[in-house]
Amino acid sequence: FPTDSKAMRYGEHTDYTGYTILAQDDSDIGEVGGGGLEVLAKGGEWLAVVPEKDTFVVNIGDLYEIWTNGRWRSTVHRVARPAPGSGAALNARLSIPFFTGPKGDALIEVLPTCVDATTPARYAPVTAGEHLRRKLGISNAN
């Protein structure tokens, strides 16, 4: 990246499948714009995820949002680019994600316990593979 770039290390997104287990980089400083993981709060503000030693971050992915009819929301998150010349910008960053999800032919639909007469299904059934292909198509459109 050019040093004056406002680009993200990884832009705003949700995880495409089940849930993600993430080992954060211990060098993340835990400040918005500091170059580490940030999550979008309900109020619309970005919050830094402060790394804690010997812990993992678990993000709910899109398929859990479908299964629970939106009761559990897929976590919107990003990895910001640190300020030029900062310690975070001068050092390599290592985070290790583990993505989970069902086989591509698995039918993903709202669970029966998450619908009733006043709360209809908000999501159409889709196979895990088709959902993944759609999301990849969107993220690779540019």
Image (cartoon, helix red, strand yellow):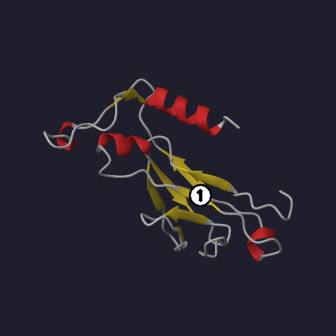
Q: Position of residue 34 (x, y in %)?
A: 67, 72
> Which quarter of the figure is the N terminus placed in?
bottom right
Q: Quadrant of residue 92?
A: bottom right
Question: Callout 1: helix, strand or loop?
Answer: strand
Placement of 55 over or under 12, stated as above or below = below
Judging depth in this view, the residue of 13 and 23 nearest the camera is 13
Label 1: few (<14), some (14–19) or many (≥20) C-alpha neighbours in 10 Å: many
- Looking at this view, name the residue that lies furthest to the right: 2
* Horizontal relation, residue 72 to residue 45: left or right: left
**Does residue 21 appear left or right of residue 125 in this picture?**
right
The residue at the point 24 percent across, 38 percent down is 111
The vertical placement of 31 against 5, above or below, is below
Q: Nearer the viewer, residue 59 or 140?
A: 140
Residue 79: x percent and y percent?
63, 60
Task: Residue at the far top: name it.
Answer: 105
Residue 45 versus residue 56: which sits nearer the camera?
45
Give the residue pinned by disc 1: 78
Residue 112: quarter of image: top left
Task: Please give the name of the residue rendered at 51% of the width and 33% of the height, measured from the top-left corner.
Answer: 132
Residue 8: give x, y in percent of width and height.
Answer: 69, 58
Question: What's the amino acid at mark 1?
Answer: Arg
Which corner quadrant holds the C terminus? top right
Query: Residue 100 at what x, y percent from top left?
Result: 46, 43
